Image (spheres, grey):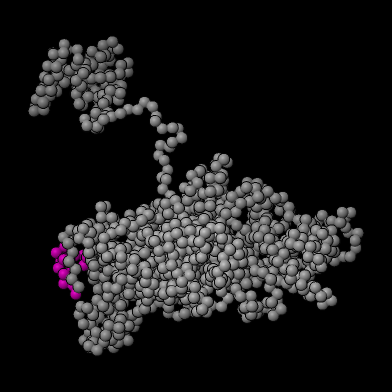
């Protein structure tokens, strides 16, 4: 304390009461001025005097003080009176260095150790990064074998293809797919584990997931077993496909083995994961949130894939609780909302397949709420009514009653008859049957659970047609827990099995996989025989690699034959059968079935593996030991080889091979390098593992040593980078994200470009022109016939080509949306002309593919180009027209033809789906305009105050757009973006008069030139692009004459060039 000017600091003093006349209310000294020498003595005397006065006037409290002072006096007398500072009162001020910290915090049983030297090295971090691999799917490698018939019954179902279903769970982002899987696992645990007495009394049987199951995911609800990655739990979203095999009974108690593949719903992961899942499954359950737009960007990409794969689909309207508790719709309005959602999804299906009313509540629609633990269909509701009381007329059975639970159907209680209009109903509520028999009882259960007291609730539940008896502990719990207990007990989720069993089983579903085979020209039942589960030879389709505890396992479907641990299989790569050398032989080390296990000690359910020594056809398994040469998909067939020395396969039949899986284009580019150059090998090794785990991601290594990763979006690449850092365990530097570019032409070459081989024995004349947009889309989607004889008819019928042109197609470049045409006129005077041209065809095609891979502007791939071979003068000797002469000449000539056809740069454009309040839709226009975007439509979402806005924005200007739009709308808008098409970059890329200023944004008219220059600089190329290096002197002369329309040779310089023009 500073007690006044010229007064020394008081360090220690006993418990005193400061007098009012000497100190103010803040403890500052305000008395007479004191000398420095006598300050301590005066202070102590005044303190003792004031203390005695206070003790005399405090009454009862003074007795305690007196007792305390007497103890101090006794101690001082015993000690000679000099130790008055040793026994300091509890309220005295003690300096920090004099405190006994550990004695005040811990008791006597705690031993305190003080380390004077750090035991760790300087490289050891204080808080080390978790070493858990991001791709660890399951915690236990094997499933513990349990006594009883359960394990044997599971194995029996594995051997019966007719009692199995392969189902993919797909849907929009945050539609509740993972929560539905938790609900199904919960019912499977209750049904098949309740016979064990030890398990029956455990906590997991009583509540399974406990209180957290009734909470939303954003509030820590649900176990979310299918989210096995740490990043998935942190972000509360699924990123990778997770398989799950479980037993579920139908309404009759018959057990089925359901193989589910839970896929993510985010648009940046949908293409990759849904493509892999649909290649394995025979049917899909499409999950939709009724309050979210049913025609979202994810569903627009999912449905075409499902229809192309001939998948049987089931619609699940999840989150029914939001209609009641969030927007509080009346039952009649809720019916119209559900009807509108089903109609919108049917409209999408009709656009892609032409089938009307694909989804109908009577056939294939499920209503559910994973948060409150129930799933029901019209069939299950009918069984509830007919098991309880008689509802319909005496001559009406359950099937007829179910048909009248949807649509314009009204029930007259007095006449016990259904009518088509409400006017015909004389008495009663005059509501639709779905509202009266389905929604009204559901609303009443919600109102009773939320609005009634404990006794009234218990009495009401006991008087239901199907009585519900809740324990007292549940009745005293929260309203969320009561709702989940009541609704899950009354409806349950096992009614879904009656609908899922309508999907095709593996015993018959293999017939729908005909389009996935690449080397079967005619798809007949005899050709499809290798996919039949009863076929003896083993055929396995691998679609994805899963990282399980540091080792990759192949997620695959066994179509036919038997597969055992230790068997030797032949793995056919993606290039087979075009490349017959893309074949390797491997030995299966282990076989696992993804499922779950119940831990009684901790009362938890965990994902686990079930080890199998052998499996037969019609199973989805994880194989270990065959992943060494698999990038993302492959075909494995049984091999007759017994040793590794044999390298030739002398099977009588040709091995069946599946087509490689194709994904949408990855247009976002990220350049990376290790922080320490010496750690480059570790980063490369990590990249190999990342590319196996993320098949849609691909790597490009430039000539300068730059490593470029391509992904579908910012979130996708962020996940890839987190996975890469875990695999490689190195620090990585990341550049600013950019975009992939494409090169194309806007017109036809001004003249035919003649290319001469280095030996001057061959001449090729080529022109380049734009390809029709519809053909480019067909090439990108791979929708062209694989049979060469059918290609000609397809082009004549679909695109209006003439017979000669359609038969002259030499090669397709699917990824670059380009093709090569033979437009030569044969010379009938030369007998060997056709033979020579046919012999040089392979070299010409390879040169075309090389030119399409790297264009002349900035070595980016071509897009939408039609290359025509107009004339070919070939040497008669095969030595003079070898591939070494033809291939580089074709590449050089194609590049020259592109530069003479007004070349342009193409940039990717994203399609945006923005969910935003209707009141701020107009304010989004300036935000989009600043980024060269445009809004195309805005559609209000029914039963809500939100609208869905559709817009387009270049990917180059979309980085950070989602953050900006959320900040601009204060978090009310949600943005989903996906690649849509390629668009021409504004400006002239070849205009050298444009001046680029460093550190300044270029105007839109200079954007093409800026991208060209910066891309060439980054790749180590010169800034100028000239056609001179692709032409010889004679061709330069002809080009200049064609541009000037002259025939005078004097216009040329001595070296044969006109630099101003060329």
Above or below, 25 against 526 in this view is above
The mark tally for this picture is 0
**Residue 631 visible in the displayed image:** no
Q: Which of 732 and 957 is in front in this view?
A: 732
Label the magenta part by its dominant secondary structure: helix
The answer to which quarter of the image holds residue 288 is: bottom left
The residue drawn where x is 46% and y is 73% is 535
> Does residue 649 appear in this view?
yes
In this view of the protein, which residue sits in the foreground, 448 or 243?
243
Q: Which of 620 and 847 is in front in this view?
A: 620
Instruction: Examine the rendered structure and indicate whether residue 626 appears above or below residue 345.
Output: above
> Looking at the rendering, which quadrant does residue 987 occupy?
bottom right
Q: Kindly indicate the quadrant of the structure image that contains residue 793.
A: bottom right
Depicted 654 relative to depicted 123: above or below: below
Span colored in magenta: 446-465
* Residue 873 % position (x, y): 81, 68
User: Does the magenta segment cover residue 674?
Assistant: no
Q: Residue at x 87, y 65 (%)?
A: 1046
Pick the quarter of the image with the C terminus.
Answer: bottom right
Residue 462 on the magenta segment: yes
Q: Is residue 737 left or right of residue 45?
A: right
Q: In which quarter of the image is the N terminus?
A: top left
Q: Is residue 194 above or below residue 441?
A: above
Q: Residue at x 52, y 55 (%)?
A: 628
* Residue 490: image location, x then y, percent: 24, 70
Residue in view at x 15 percent, y 15 percent: 76
User: At which x and y percent is residue 698?
Assistant: 56, 56
Q: Position of residue 420 (x, y in %)?
A: 32, 86
């Amino acid at each position: 304390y500073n007690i006044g000017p010229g007064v020394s600091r008081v360090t220690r003093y006993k418990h005193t009461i400061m007098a009012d006349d000497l100190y103010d209310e803040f403890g500052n000294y305000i008395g007479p001025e004191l000398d420095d020498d006598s300050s301590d003595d005066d202070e102590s005397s005044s303190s003792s005097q004031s203390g005695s006065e206070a003790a005399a006037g405090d009454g009862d409290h003074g007795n305690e003080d007196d007792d305390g002072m007497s103890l101090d006096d006794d101690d001082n007398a015993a000690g000679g009176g000099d130790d008055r500072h040793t026994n300091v009162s509890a309220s005295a001020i003690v300096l920090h260095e004099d405190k006994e910290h550990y004695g005040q915090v811990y008791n006597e049983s705690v031993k305190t150790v003080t380390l004077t030297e750090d035991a760790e090295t300087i490289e050891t971090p204080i808080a080390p990064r978790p070493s858990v691999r991001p791709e660890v799917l399951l915690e236990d490698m094997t499933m513990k074998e349990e006594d009883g018939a359960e394990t044997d019954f599971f194995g029996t179902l594995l051997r019966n293809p007719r009692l199995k279903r392969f189902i993919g769970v797909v849907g929009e982002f945050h539609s509740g797919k993972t929560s539905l899987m938790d609900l199904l696992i919960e019912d499977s645990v209750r049904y098949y584990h309740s016979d064990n007495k030890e398990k029956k009394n455990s906590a997991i049987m009583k509540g399974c997931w406990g209180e957290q199951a009734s909470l939303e995911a954003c509030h820590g609800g649900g176990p979310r077993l299918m989210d096995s990655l740490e990043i998935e739990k942190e972000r509360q979203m699924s990123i990778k496909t997770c398989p799950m095999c479980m037993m579920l009974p139908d309404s009759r108690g018959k057990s089925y083995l359901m193989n589910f593949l839970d896929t993510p719903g985010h648009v940046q992961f949908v293409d990759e994961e849904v493509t892999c899942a649909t290649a394995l499954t025979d049917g899909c359950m499409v999950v939709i949130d009724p309050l979210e737009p049913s025609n979202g960007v994810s569903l627009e990409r999912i449905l075409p894939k499902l229809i192309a794969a001939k998948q049987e689909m089931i619609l699940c309207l999840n989150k029914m609780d939001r209609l009641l508790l969030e927007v509080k719709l009346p039952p009649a309005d809720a019916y119209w909302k559900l009807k509108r959602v089903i109609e919108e999804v049917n409209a999408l299906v009709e656009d892609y397949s032409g089938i009307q009313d694909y989804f109908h509540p009577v056939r294939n629609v499920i209503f559910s709420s994973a948060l409150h633990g129930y799933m029901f269909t019209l069939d299950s509701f009918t069984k509830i009514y007919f098991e309880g009381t008689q509802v319909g007329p005496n001559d009406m059975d359950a099937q007829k009653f179910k048909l009248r639970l949807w649509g314009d159907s009204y029930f007259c209680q007095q006449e016990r008859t259904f009518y088509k209009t409400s006017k015909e109903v004389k008495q009663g509520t005059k509501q639709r049957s779905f509202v009266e028999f389905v929604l009204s009882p559901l609303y009443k259960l919600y109102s009773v659970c939320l609005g009634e007291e404990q006794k009234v609730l218990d009495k009401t539940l006991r008087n239901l047609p199907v009585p519900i008896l809740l324990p007292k502990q549940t009745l005293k719990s929260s309203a969320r827990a009561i709702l989940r207990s009541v609704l899950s007990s009354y409806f349950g989720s096992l009614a879904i099995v009656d609908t899922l069993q309508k999907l095709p089983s593996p015993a018959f579903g293999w017939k729908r996989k005909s389009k996935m085979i690449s080397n079967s020209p005619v798809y007949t039942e005899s050709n499809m025989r290798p996919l039949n589960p009863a076929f003896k030879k083993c055929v396995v389709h691998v679609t994805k690699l899963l990282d399980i505890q540091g080792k990759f396992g192949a997620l695959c479907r066994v179509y036919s034959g038997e597969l055992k641990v230790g068997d030797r299989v032949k793995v056919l790569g993606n290039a087979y059968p075009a490349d017959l050398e893309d074949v390797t032989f491997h030995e299966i080390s282990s076989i696992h079935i993804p499922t779950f296990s119940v831990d009684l000690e901790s009362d938890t359910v965990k994902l686990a593996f079930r080890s199998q020594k052998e499996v037969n056809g019609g199973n989805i398994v994880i194989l270990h030991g065959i992943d060494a040469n698999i990038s993302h998909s492959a075909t494995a067939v049984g091999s007759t080889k017994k040793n590794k020395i044999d390298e030739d396969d002398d099977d009588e039949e040709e091995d069946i091979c599946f087509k490689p899986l194709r994904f949408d284009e990855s247009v976002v580019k990220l350049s990376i390098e290790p922080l320490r150059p010496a750690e480059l090998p570790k980063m490369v090794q990590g990249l190999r593992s990342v590319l196996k785990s993320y098949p849609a991601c691909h790597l490009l290594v430039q000539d300068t040593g730059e490593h470029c990763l391509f992904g579908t979006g910012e979130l996708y690449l962020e996940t890839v980078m987190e996975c890469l850092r875990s695999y490689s365990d190195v620090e990585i530097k990341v550049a600013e994200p950019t975009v992939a570019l494409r090169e194309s032409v806007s017109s036809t070459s001004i003249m035919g470009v003649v290319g001469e081989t280095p030996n001057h024995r061959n001449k090729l004349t080529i022109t380049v022109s734009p390809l029709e947009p519809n053909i480019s889309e067909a090439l990108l989607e791979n929708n062209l016939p694989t049979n060469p004889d059918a290609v000609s008819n397809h082009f004549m019928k679909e695109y209006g080509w003439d017979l000669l042109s359609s038969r002259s197609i030499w090669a397709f470049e699917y990824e670059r949306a380009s093709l090569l045409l033979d437009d030569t006129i044969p010379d009938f005077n030369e007998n060997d002309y056709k033979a020579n041209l046919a012999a040089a065809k392979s070299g010409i095609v390879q040169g075309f593919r090389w030119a399409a891979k790297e264009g002349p502007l900035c070595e980016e791939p071509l897009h939408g180009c039609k290359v025509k071979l107009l004339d070919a003068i070939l040497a008669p000797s095969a030595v003079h027209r070898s591939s070494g002469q033809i291939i580089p000449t074709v590449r050089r000539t194609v590049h020259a033809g592109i530069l003479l056809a007004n070349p342009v740069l193409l940039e990717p454009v994203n399609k945006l789906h923005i969910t935003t309040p209707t009141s701020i839709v107009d304010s989004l226009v300036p935000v989009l305009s600043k980024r060269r975007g445009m809004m195309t439509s805005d559609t209000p979402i029914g039963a809500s105050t939100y609208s869905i806005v559709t817009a387009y924005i270049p990917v180059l200007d979309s980085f950070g757009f989602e953050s900006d739009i959320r900040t601009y709308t204060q978090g009310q808008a949600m943005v989903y973006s996906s690649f849509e098409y390629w668009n021409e970059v504004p400006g002239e890329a070849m205009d050298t008069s444009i001046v680029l200023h460093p550190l300044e944004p270029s105007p839109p008219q200079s954007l093409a030139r800026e991208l060209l220059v910066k891309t060439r600089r980054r790749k180590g190329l010169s800034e100028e692009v000239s056609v001179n290096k692709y032409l010889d002197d004679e061709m330069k002369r002809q080009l200049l004459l064609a541009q000037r329309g002259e025939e005078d040779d004097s216009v040329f310089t001595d070296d044969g060039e006109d630099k101003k023009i060329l």
